[in-house]
Image (cartoon, coloured by chain):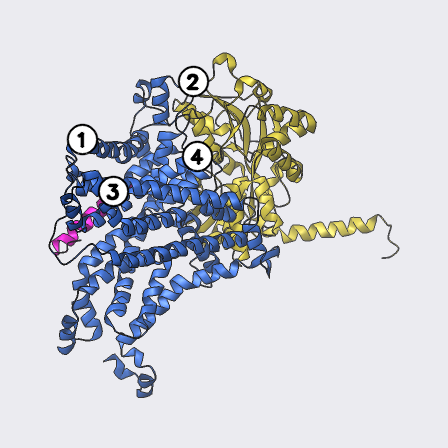
Amino acid sequence: MSTIALPRTVRSTFPLLRDPALLVPLVGAGVLIYLAVLPLFMLLLGSFQVEVAPREFITSLKNYKEAYASQHTYSTFVNSLIFAGGASLLAFALGTILAWLVERTNTPLRVIFVPVAVVPLILPGVLEAIAWIFLLSPKFGYINVALTNLFGLQSPPFNVFTLPGMIWVHSVGQVPLAFLMMVAAFKSMDPSLEESAMMSGAGTWQTLRRITLRLLMPTAASVLLILFVRTLESFEAPALIGIPARIYVYTSEIYLAFSEYPPDYGRGSALAVGLLILSALGVWLYTRSTREGKRFQTVTGKAFRPRQFDLGPWRWVGFAFLLTYFLGVVLLPFLVMLWASFLPFFSAPSWKSLQLLSLENYRYLSSFRPFWDAMWNSVILALSTATAGMVLTSLIAWVVYKSRLPGSWILDFLAFVPITVPGIVLGMALIMLYVAFPLPIYGTLWVLLIAYVTRYIPYGMRSASGAILQIHSELEEAAGASGASWWQTFWRVTLPLLRPGFVAGWIYICIVSFREFSTSVLLATGDSRVLSILLFNMFEQGQVTVVAAIGIVMIFTLLAIVAIFHKVSGRVGIQA
Amino acid sequence: MCRRKPLATPLFSGLILSCLLLLSSSPATSQTLDELHKLALKEGGTLNCYCTLAQINAIKIFPVFEKRFPGIKVNHVDATADQLASRAVAEARGGRTVGDVIQASIENVVQVFEQKLVLEKVPPEAEAYPAYLKGTYWVAGDMIYIIAAWNTELVKKTDEPKSFEDFADPKWKGKLMAEPRDVELLMGLARSKYKNDEKAVALLRRIAANNVEFHKGHSDLAELLVAGQGAACLTCYSHHYPPRIKKGAPVGYLLAEGIGTMEGTAVFKNAPHPNTAWLFARWVASEEGQKVYAQGGRAPAHPKVEPVEKVRPEKIYPIGADEIKAWPKYEKTWKEIFKLR
C-alpha cells in the first residue's frame, strides 16, 4: 500500500524500493563497505600523513621508515614471531593431547573433561593474564613463593614477566580453541586406515605416529595457522605482561604509539598496516590450507565410529595429564582470583592472610559507580552486538547462498575481511575515522558497537551460513507462491528456520563481546568504559584485589547470560 | 599628549591595559560559583574531565562536586597523564576537542599547552597560591610527594632508610623498585637538596648500580611493594600509604624528606562545555574544593588547607614552574642513568 503514495515515475526510477531481494544485497554491501573497508582506508591514508607542525600534515613515507627502520623494529618483529610461534605451538600441543585423550583413548573419566576443557573460553583474557601474574610473579606469585619455601630455593623458579611467561599465559587461553578444533578432526576420522595398519601388525604408537598424525596434518596446519594469527593479534598478555617487562610486540607498539606522549599516529598506522598484512597473509594461508584439506577428506558417507586406542596402564598417565590440566590451568587461575577477591591487599595464603579475608571488596563494588556503569555498558554492548551482528549476517548469508544474484560472492568476501583485522588495528582505524567524522559518536558506546559488530561479522557469518545452507529453497518458494512478500518470507519462514544457527552465533558473539579488550582499549573512555577496560585501568592503578572481585562478578555474569539465553531458547524449542 | 613626561606614558597605558584586562576577565572573576553553575547547566550538565585521579580518590571527590552543583555529571576519562595528553592531542588533530578540563602531572599539562590546546587564563582562586604553584594557564590541583617506602616484612626496623642517600648502600642490591617516569627525583635532588647536578647524578648512579626494577604506575608500584615484589620503593607517592597501612598492609614510608611535585588543572581552549569546565577549575582551586580533595585522600595544594592524612614530608624539595622548563635536560640524564627507553 505504501507504494501507492509514490508517483509512478519514482517507482520506476527506484525499483529497489519495491524489491527487497535487490535492496538487501545493496544495503548489505553498503553496510559491509562502511564497516570493514572504510576504517582500513582511513588507516592506510593516515599511515602516509606526517605532522610537521601542530595539526599541519604532509604526505610522506617517513612513518614507514620510522616504523620499520628504527632500532626497535627488529626486536619487535622477532618478539612477535617468537610470541606467536611459541604460543600457537604450545596451545596446539596441549589442545591436541587433550583432544586425543578425550576422543580417541580409553583414559578414565575422559567424558567429563570435554566441558571442563572449554571452560577457560568464558574467562576474559585480561583476567587470565592477571590471574597468572598472581601465580607466577617472580617475587610474590603464589606458585613461586610455595616452591621457594618448599625446596629452599635461592631464586624463584618462574618469572611471568618474560617472553616464555607471555607465551604461557596466552597459550593456556587458546587451548580450548585448539581442543575444540582437534576434537572435531579426531571425531570425523575414518578408522579404516588405522584398522588396516593394526591388522598389518602395527602397534598403538606406530599407528598413531604413521597413520593418525599424518592424516591430521592438514587440519593441524590450519589450526596452527589460526592460533598463530590470533596470538599475533592479541593484546592482553602484551599489555599486562609485555609492557611492564619491556618486551614489545606489534600490538603493544601500536598501543604505545597512540597512547604515549607525543602520540604518533603515523608510525602507529604504519605498524598497524604491517600487522594487518601479516595477519591477512596468515588468514589467506589458513583458508588455502583448509581448502587443500578437502583433498585429505576423512569424513565419508559411510557410517563409522572412530576406534579407541587402548592405552593399557598408560591410561592412568593420560588421566593424570587431564587432571593436572584441570587443576593447574582451569581451576587454579579461578581459585587465585576468588582468594584475592576476599583480601584487602594482595598477600600469599597464610594463617595471617586467612584472618584478613572479608567481603569488603564486594561491598565496595556494590556502591562503586564506575563498576555499575561499566557493567551496564558491557551487558548492553554484548546483547546489542550479538543481536545486530546476527541479524546483519543472517541477511548477508541469505543473499550469498540463496539469492543467486551475480556478484554475491563479493558480500561473502567483504564479510570475511574483518577476520584479518587485529582488534587494536581496528580500534586505531576507527579513532582516525570517527574523531574527524561529523557524526558525534566518537567516545560513545555507538563507536564500540560499530567496532564489535565489525569484528564479529565473520563469526556470525559462519553460524548463519551453516544454518542457511540447510534450509531448502522450496520452503521459501512455497511461501512466495502463497502470496507472502519477501520480508514476510524472511521473517516468518527463513529466520525461524535459521534459529539454531542464529542462537549458537548469538551466544558466541555475546561472550566474546562481553570480554572484548583489544579494540576497546583505544575506543572506550569515560562514560563508554566497559568492564575489561575498567579492570585494566584499576589493575594499573593498583586496586588488584578489587579487580579480582570484579573478575569473579564478571565470570558469573557471563555464565548467567549464557544460562538465561539457553533456557529461553530451549523453551521456544531451539537447540544451540 | 606628546609633551607628557616619558614615565607617564607607560604608566598610563599600563593602567588602561589593566582595566581592559580586568574587564575582559570580569565574567569569570565577578561571578560566584553558583552563578557559574547556572551557566554551566545550560551546557547540558556534563563535564568531560581528563583527570588522572585514581578511581579510589575519584569516587570520593566527584560525587561531592556533583552534589554541590546539582545537574552536573562528571564524565571521568581516566588514564595516566601521558595517555591523557596524548589523547587530547590526537583528538585535536582530528579537529575535535572532547575534554573540558585536564588535570594531570604538570609536565603533561605543559605538553598540551605547547600544542595550543588550553586557555591561557587562571581562576581568581589562584591568587591564594604561591608563585611556584601556578602558571599563566594552570594552577596546582593537588600536591604529590615522591617519597621512599618499604615492605616491613622484608626490611628490618634497623635497616629502614632515613634518607634517599641510604639506597646507595649495596645491601639494597636487587631489592629496589621505582617508576620509570620519575625524573622529579633527579630534579629535586639536583636543584633543591644539593643545588648541584653532579652530586645528584653521582648518587643516582650509585643507586642504579643496585639494579633498580622499574614498574609503570605509582598505585601499581605501591601494590607491588605490599605484595613483596621489591623490598623498598625509591619513588613512591606518599598518599598511597595511609589507606594501605589502615588496612593492615605491611608497609612503612619515609616522611623525613620528599620531592614536592604537583598535578595542574587547566581548561581546554575549545572545551565543549566551557562554563562547566571553568566551574570545575575554580572549584578545584578554591579552599572548598581543596578540602574535598584532602578528604578524598589527596594532598591539597591550597596553602590554607592541611592534608587529612600524614602525607606531607618534613623537608620538601619542590618541583615548580621553573623546574618544569628544565625537564627535557634532566629527563635525558635520568633515562641514561637507569638505561630506560
Q: Is residue A211 visible?
A: yes
Give the residue number, with chain letter if any, for mark 2.
B153
Chain for colour yellow: B
Residue indicated by mark 4: A162
For this view, does B188 lie left or right of residue B75? right
Foreground residue, B244 or A290?
A290
Question: Farthest front residue?
Answer: A200
For marks 3 and 2, give the one nearer the viewer: 3
Q: Residue A316 — which label?
A: 1
- Which-is-in-front pick, marks 4 and 1? 1
Q: Nearer the viewer, mark 2 or mark 1?
A: 1
Q: Could you tell me if the residues under marks 3 and 4 are in contact, i.e. CB atoms within 8 Å?
A: no
Badge 2 density bin: few <14, some 14–19, many ≥20, Cα 10 Å: some
> Dot 4, crowdedness within 10 Å: few (<14), some or many (≥20)?
some
Crowd class of label 1 (few under 14; some 14 to 19; many from 20; radius 10 Å) = some
Q: Chain of mark 4?
A: A
Could you tell me the amino acid type at mark 4?
Thr
- Residue A321 location (% of width, % of height): 24, 33
Q: CA distance from mark 4 to mark 1?
A: 34 Å
Specify start and end residues of the magenta stretch as a single range.
A554-576
How far apart are labels 3 and 4 at the CA level?
34 Å
Residue B55 visible: no
In primary-sequence order, the first of circles 1 and 3 is 3
Which chain letter goes with mark 1?
A: A
Magenta segment, principal secondary structure? helix
Counting residues from the N terminus, which is met first, the one under dot 4 or under dot 1? Answer: 4
Earlier sequence position, callout 3 versus callout 4: 4
Residue B251 magenta-highlighted: no
Q: CA distance from mark 2 to mark 1?
A: 44 Å
Disc on res. A209: 3
